[in-house]
Every structure is written in structure tokens, then in C-alpha cells.
Amino acid sequence: MREPKTFFSLAQLVNHGKSCAPDYQTISFDLFDTLLIRRIHEPDLVKLPVARYLASLAKAAGIEKSPRAIQKIRDRIEKHQRAETGKSFDDHEARYPVFMEKTLREIFGSHYNGQLLAEVTRYELEMESRVLVPRQLLVEWLEQLQAQNKRVLIISDIYLPAEHLKVLVEGAGLLHLVEDVVSSADTFLAKASGKAFPLVQEKYNIDTTTWLHVGDNPISDGLRPAEFGIDALVLKDSDEKFRKALIKRYYNYGKGRPFYRGRALQQLMMPLEGERSEGNDLYVEGYNFLAPLIGAFVQHIAEESRRLGLTKVFFFSREGYTFKKVWDIITPTLFPDGNLPQTEYLYVSRMALAGASCAYQGLTNVSANIALLPPGNKDFRDIARIFQFDVQALEPHLHAHKLNADSILSSLHEGYDEKFSVRFMELLEDENFQKAVKLQTAASNAALMKYLTELDLFSHSQVAMVDIGWLGTIQRFLYDAVKHRHDCPRMLGYVFGATRGIPFGGDLKSNLEGVIYDRSNLELGASCLLYARDLFEEACRAPHPTLEGYIDTEDGYELKFRKTDDATGRAELEQDQYFSPLQMGIYAGVEAYAGASSLLGYGLNDYRPWFSYLLTSKLAFPRTSEVVTMRHRHHLDDFHGTSKPNQKRIKEVKALWDRSLLSLRFLPFLRTRLFWKHIRTVLNS
Amino acid sequence: MKNLKTSRYDITGNSFFRVLRFNLLNKVVPTGNYRMGTGLRPGMTLLLLHWFGRPLFRLLIRYEPQLHRLYQKLKKY
């Protein structure tokens, strides 16, 4: 008997294999933990998402069974099949199509059909594919072997038949490099007992003296082939043991300490082997910092939509562009039963909706306050700019209340007098003024109605509205524009962060939830989002200009976008180009997020403690290099005016993310001092 | 160009050492609800594993069968 050779690193094994390859005509490989490695330490964990999937399918069929109960049924039936096989064969093997069919029949009873088995098999193979990664050095060796006209086989001891293994091997991009794939599930003759080797020798007519086998199990891939006269190389990869020891601990600690759940998620998201693992600083931040946050945000919305039975999700432009893209990437993996609402990207903006919101209710005090909130806005001209009023036509109404378009209405500006605010309130109560406002904004509202009707808004009773944040102004204006209609749906708003500077309406048909941060919940970690709101806006922004308004035309409506050929448009383009690697990192990251989160079976609430840390460390206590990399270069906001407020009245401390490189690097305790101020602000607000 | 993970299988720009430092800071200044945080023993285990895991496993893997037998014996007591 030839002694199998053991290697403690893959590189050593491959070098040896390459040097002795001329002596062999056939090289067979073990599949799992040799050619392909799993991201997770425990192969059985892949079965859990399948159990959750089956539970959701069963629920749809009116059968209440928990994923745990389903997993138990599967384990019992598989165990029974192994015991039965053991009566006739040396190996106690199982065959997936057989025990899964029995499992499904037991769960679904009369609801079972062949299509169900095909669907479940497809999902199980997809989940397996997601956690499998081909080993780069072995792939390169396989390519060499193919070029040398060697016969290459894959032999695996597993419950999946060869046809299923081929799907996995093809998914890993290796199928064209091998002659065939052999599975113990087809014959119940496995490598473990050594019976697989004579079978393969006979089937493929192989000379054992020119046959080399490579695998990771000292018995199945070392001793057994050696007993049959085959040279064997056994891989005991210390790096793989190290990697798996880490993920095992993160996963297990996460069961008792929720803080580790998010860290386990990120450990699972890490690219392995030949997967793209490099990028510039922005790509890395997109992948490692923003992707988990955005992934969990979108996952939460999908979960809420399913729980509340929402039938459509509208993603508001322009940040909703990224959220919708993330939705399209993650939901097929996270919710394989397909029980999801329709989605739509809605072209909206505060500026475009502001006018339309006044067509039926006129200009309200709250709407005017929102317009005067940014420090750059000070008078009626700013209000008119935002709500797209014709100032000249409204001047007689202003004069009737001893106001003019330049009367200062914001207390932050020089020349403000309280009497102007009182007169402005009286103006808002003036019916003639409101009639004029309604008349001016009627066309914009009519165009909006046509647009929303085309997007099917009014045929749903409950819809979700998704946006980045912060006051929920877009949703507020949108609801104000449509609430007069009897078929106006209930709008459930989900924003990344809700600052609630102006309380969100008291209407049951429109509410707002800050998913990652909500001012109404005291969470200091999440409140660090306030340090760099613009970062999130710029990171998620769509590559199209902002919407300026809805134009009513004879044959329908027209969406009017902001021009891009001026200085602001060019600055925005430059910003988009600068943040493009960040967005690429986000998209690559959320793809990994989907597989990892699906495997872990966790949701946003499980990840919150980790996100709390992530936001604090990255936003409130960032490294100087992180601020320099991630802070935006340009940030366009048409809503904000250009007037300079009285500096004494705003009393603003310069934010950490606006500080110079020198002060970020050298000012002692800068982050601690600002964080202390931040805590006081959050606690007092 | 940067790698998304370090050679210690740690997150680039967010090493476990940084995680531990913030957990320590959280004991003094309220920086957020970490829901039990890292814990001393799991935290130290992971930190040491990240730092010394690679050479340690390189050494121990050669004695895997012996260690396995030792673990089995220890389990009995």
C-alpha cells in the first residue's frame, strides 16, 4: 500500500501536484473542502434557510409549521434513510431527492406536487452555491491539467446526486474543466468505505497506477484510495481551519451576545479566494461600512411589507434609486417564496411636490415652516421659490397684511421682527390668498395626479414609501397633494433616518418610521447618523438630476428635471463620479449581505447593537483618513436658499465632518468634546 | 488599492481591536446600546485568535489527531 502524502498548506499541495502530474493520467478531486470551500464553518447551517423557506411555503398553503419543526422532520427522514441504506451497503448514505420528497409529503400532505420538490431543490442548490467558493490555486491547477489533456474527475461523498453536484460545480465555474462528477448518493458506494474507487475505476476504465486522488479527509481521501493502489494527496489546510475557527466563534457568540450577530454577518460577507477583494478606499467603505446598513434597512422594509400585507413599495427619487437597486439584489435570496409587494421608483422631490401639495389645502403653516427651516431661507421670496408661486400675483395679498415679498420671516436673519410672523399667520388665514395659491398650483397637482394614476398608486389600499430621511417632507407633501381623494392609499413611510425636526402629521393614513435612526427612540449609537447625513444622501443618490416639477400637458404630463449644464449640475456630476466606487462597493456588499443574512436568519433588530457601534466608530470617532475619504465634495440642495443668517443667532459649532484636515488630526480630544455635545443635544431634543 | 479584509481575516478599517476599544469606551461614556457588548472572555479569545490564529493553527494542525484524542479525554472529565 502506498502511503498518502499529507500537506499543511494548499500552495505546497498544488506545487507537489504540479511537479508529479506528468506521472499520472487521471486526477480525481474531492469536492467539498477541497475544490470548493464553504463560507460557513458548519455545512448543516445551509439547511436552515431551506427550512425557513419550507415554513413560508407551508404557511402559504395554510399549514403552520416552524422552521425548527421542519428541520427536525428532514433530519429524521434523512437519518432513517441512512439507516436503511446501511442494511444493504457498507456506507450509510442518503439521497436528497428521495428523503426531501418524503419530507415534503409529510409536511404538505395532499398539497404536495412534483413542482414543489423542483422548487425546493432549486433553492437548496442556490443556497449551497452562495456559500461555496472555488479555491483559486486549484482552479489554476485544473486549467493546467486540462491543457495537458489529463482526465479530471470529481468524487464526492454527499447526499446530493451527481446531477445536483454538477449544478454547484457549474456555478463555481469548474464544470468545463472536469470530465465527470461522481456522487455517493447515486450508488450508495462511498469513498469512506473505499467502495467508490473500484466503481469509478470500472466505469471510467482507469489504470490505478496512473491515478492520483486529492482530498481533505485522511481516511476517505487518503487511506482508502491508498488501499486500492491509488496515490493520494491529503490537504490539511491550517489557514482554512483558522478562518473557520473565527466564523464559528462569531456565530456561536452571537447566539448569546447579540452584539456579535452583525459582526458574524460581516465575517460571512468577506470575499474569499478569487472573489473581488480589492478596491480603492471608497469601495472598501461602501462594502464594509455602508452595505450592511443599507442591506438591513431594505431587508426591514421587505419584512414589514410582508407582515403588514403592503401591496406596493414606492422608492422616492433620488436616494430611493439605490434602495430599489438593493431591493432587487437582496430580496430574491432573502425571500425566495416571492411573496413580496410590487416596487416602483417614484420621481419626486421636495421642490416638485411643494407646489402640488397646496392645490387643495392651500399653503399651511407647517408647510411654510418647513420652507423657512433651512438657515438660508428668510422671506416670502424663498417660500415662493420652493412652492413655485408667482410672487407678483400674490403681492396684493401680502400688502393687504402689511407684508411684502422681502419681509424677513425667519428669526435667524437680520431685520426679523415678530410682527412679520404674526402678519404672515394672518395671511395664511386669508381665504383670498389661499384661493390664489390653489389656483396657481392646480396645474402642477393635476399633472401629479396623472403621473400617480399611471403608476397605479390609487388602486392600492396600503403602500410603503421609502426615502433616505430626514423630516419626511417629500411624503408629507405627497400626502397633502393626494389626501383629498377618496381612493388615497394609506402611506407607511420608511426612512433611513428620521430627525423629526417638525412633528410628522397626526394623520393615521400617513405615518413615518425612522428605520436605522428615529429621533423618537433614544439610541445614541444610531443618532451618530446626524454627524454626516450628507454622506448617506450622496452615497445613495441616483445618477440623474433632481426633479423640478410636474407639467400638465394636453396629452398627459411631463416631468421637468433640473438642467445639468450649469455650475451646480457640473459639480453634482463631479460628486457622482467621485462617489462611484463607493456605490460599487455598496452593490457588491449587499450581494454578499443577502447570502450572509439569509444564512444567519437574522434581521435588523439582531444587527442593531453592531450598527450602533459601527455608526459611533465611523461617524463620531472616525479616523482622519476616513473623513477625508468619505466626505462629499459637493452637495446640491435647491430647497436651501443662499441668504446668510446672523451667525450670532445660529450658534452652530462646526461639525466634525466639516473640520479641516489639520484640526481633525491635531486638535486634542476634538471627537470626544463634540461627541459630548452631541449626547447633550440628543438628550435635550 | 486596499483589500476588503486583512491577512488576519479581520475587517479592513474596522479591526476587532477597534471593536474592543469602543466596547471599553462604552463602559465609561454611553456610546450606544451594544446589548451586552463583546464580553471580556469572548472578546479576548477573538482578539488573540485574530492576532495569533494563523501561526497557532499552522503549528497545531500537525498534531490534530493527538489533540482530538486529548479533547475527547478532557470532555469526559
Image (tube, rainbow, N blue to C red):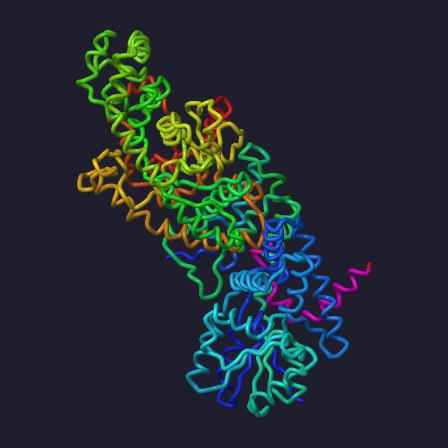
Q: Where are the magenta residues, as a range?
A: B47-76
**Which of A646 and A571 lies nearest the eye of the viewer?**
A571
Question: Residue B46 at x, y = what percent?
Answer: 60, 52
Question: Residue A37 at x, y = what percent?
Answer: 55, 67
Q: Quadrant of residue A249?
A: bottom right
Q: Quadrant of residue A372?
A: top left
Residue at 55% over, 37% down: B25
**Which of A94 and A643 lies nearest the eye of the viewer?**
A94
Q: Is residue A318 visible?
A: no
Is A236 rendered above or below residue A66? below
Is A406 rendered above or below residue B46? above
Residue at 37% over, 20% down: A366
Give the main secondary structure of the magenta stretch: helix
Residue at 72% over, 74% down: A92
- Magenta segment: does it hold A373? no
Question: Residue B45 at x, y = what percent?
Answer: 63, 52
